[in-house]
Image: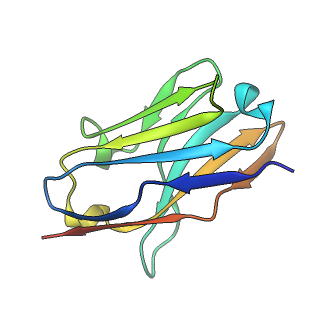
Amino acid sequence: QVQLVESGGGLVQAGGSLRLSCAASRSIFRVSDMGWYRQAPGKQRDLVARITSSGSTDYADSVKGRFTISRDNAKNTVYLEMNSLKPEDTAVYYCNAHWAMRDWWGQGTQVTVSS
């Protein structure tokens, strides 16, 4: 079983920055595509950013130029650097690992951006 543990959420003013971290429990991390998703109240869970096992990245249009996803395979950790945060970025952010047609999810971390 793969466990994903997120950290780094919190309350920040608009225009501020946060860095989310997601630590995976197993070396499967190195062969997994990793992603960050978010879910606001009453809305569906949407992809924010993802990074493949080879390092290719993809972003939602709403965060391009503001968020950066990266991974440290030596630490089994994926990061989401979030800059120029907006109130509409407020959501629970979930870490995802995808490998061999399976998905694992973290418990989520709350990000709240005040105006």
Left or right side of 95 for 81: left
Q: Which percent across, then down, holds residue 39?
A: 47, 67
Asked if 89 appears above or below 19 in the picture, the reply is: below
* Closer-to-camera residue (62/8): 8
Query: Splitting the image into 4 quarters, where does residue 10 fall?
Result: bottom left
| Residue in the image at 63% along x and 65% along y | 107
| Residue in the image at 66% along x and 33% along y | 76
Identify the image's colour scheme: rainbow, by chain, secondary structure or one colour: rainbow
| Outermost residue to the front | 75
| Residue in the image at 21% along x and 66% along y | 87
| Outermost residue to the bottom | 42
Q: How many marks?
A: 0
Left or right side of 115 for 63: right
Left or right side of 74 for 16: left
Left or right side of 106 for 7: left
Q: Which percent across, then down, holds residue 93?
A: 48, 60
| Residue in the image at 51% along x and 70% along y | 44
* Closer-to-camera residue (72/31): 72
| Outermost residue to the top | 54
Asked if 47 appears above or below 91 in the picture, the reply is: above
Quadrant of the frame with the C terminus: bottom left
Q: Which percent across, then down, holds residue 2?
A: 80, 48
Query: Splitting the image into 4 quarters, where does residue 9 fall?
Result: bottom left
Q: Which percent across, then down, holds residue 91?
A: 40, 68
* Closer-to-camera residue (15/64): 15
